[in-house]
Image: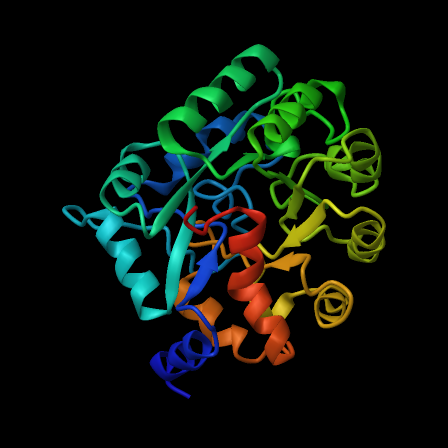
Amino acid sequence: MPRGILACILTNSLAAGGIVDLMLGFPVVDPKLNYAFMQKALREVDADTTEMPAGYMFKGVPNGLKEGEDPVEVTLAAMDRNGIAIGLVGAHGDAAKQALKDHPDRFKASLEVDPNNVTKAVRRIRAAYDEFDIKAVTSFPAGLMPQVAVSDPKYYPIYQTCIDLGIPMIINAGIAGPRVPSACQDVMHFDQVCYDFPELVIVMRHGAEPWQDLAVKLMLKWPGLHYMTSAFAPKYYPQAIIDYANTRGRDKVLYAGYYPMGLSLDRIVTELADVPFRPETRQAFLRDNALRVFKLLPN
């Protein structure tokens, strides 16, 4: 079936007008500059990891921009072509700041933080909340130098700040794609965090593999714990997550893509049509859960 028809089918199945993508970005002329911060931490750097640290896992990465192209307009065109109504983007870089200013109805802000400097991280969160009305704080434990485990006390002031501001924390879970150690992202860490911060809304990103069954068990246990599908092509969504979303986890599993870091929106939408979600699950997964959890509806 042509891609445009698939996009219409997905979009028209949503009650209030379009998909919410919880991990979106803007293409750049030189993608490797985005990941310069990680190069020293990688065990091996080769042709597959120079431009993208997990490039060995992603082929045909769309993160390229021709000279003279406007990254915001390129991203908006991809969103429109595929029925994406709203994208959550990191509040850093000129393109993101311009998009947030010029298209506040299409883009919402998040902020990536490093807990190795706790005071700076908390101050950055509060400043970004005032300036950009950020809807989430994000962090990549395995990508930090030094790494910080999900349940490390360095994160605790950040978690409390999210509670105080009423915004979710998005944090990587599972084996990291880049060739760095991953113990800091073991899903079992979330059990301790949820115990210590019962008011925290926390969203696991990047798959939680190979602990996806444990992720489901913990989501059943802890009301504030959620999961989003970032960095996974839909045909590779873990079966345990699909089964959970179709049953007791309909309100806990949220859609997030990986454009342009690893996947094109065209590919994602094409493959979404084949994921065996129930109709009511698809609506919740692609839109309703994001609007509720990230408070994206107008007051």
**Which residue appears at 76% of the width and 66% of the height?**
244
**177 in relation to 133, above or below:** below
Q: Nearer the viewer, residue 200 or 181?
A: 200
In the rendered structure, the answer to whether residue 263 lies left or right of residue 185 reads: left
Looking at this view, name the residue that lies furthest to the left. Answer: 68
Looking at this view, name the residue that lies furthest to the front. Answer: 299
Q: Nearer the viewer, residue 136 or 271?
A: 136
Question: Residue 150 occupies which quadrant of the picture?
Answer: top right
Task: Specify whether residue 231 is in view.
Answer: no
Task: Specify whether residue 151 is in view.
Answer: yes
x, y percent for residue 266: 40, 69
In the rendered structure, the answer to whether residue 12 lies left or right of residue 227 reads: left
In the rendered structure, the answer to whether residue 251 lies left or right of residue 139 reads: right
Q: Nearer the viewer, residue 11 or 256?
A: 11
x, y percent for residue 39: 52, 30
Question: Residue 7 occupies which quadrant of the picture?
Answer: bottom left
Chosen colour scheme: rainbow
Figure disc tally: 0
**Which residue appears at 17% of the width and 46% of the height?**
67
x, y percent for residue 52: 47, 44
**Which residue appears at 28% of the width and 43% of the height?**
99
**125 in relation to 251, above or below:** above
**174 in relation to 14, above or below:** above
x, y percent for residue 98: 25, 38
Quarter placement of the N terminus: bottom left
**Which residue appears at 30% of the width and 45% of the height?**
104
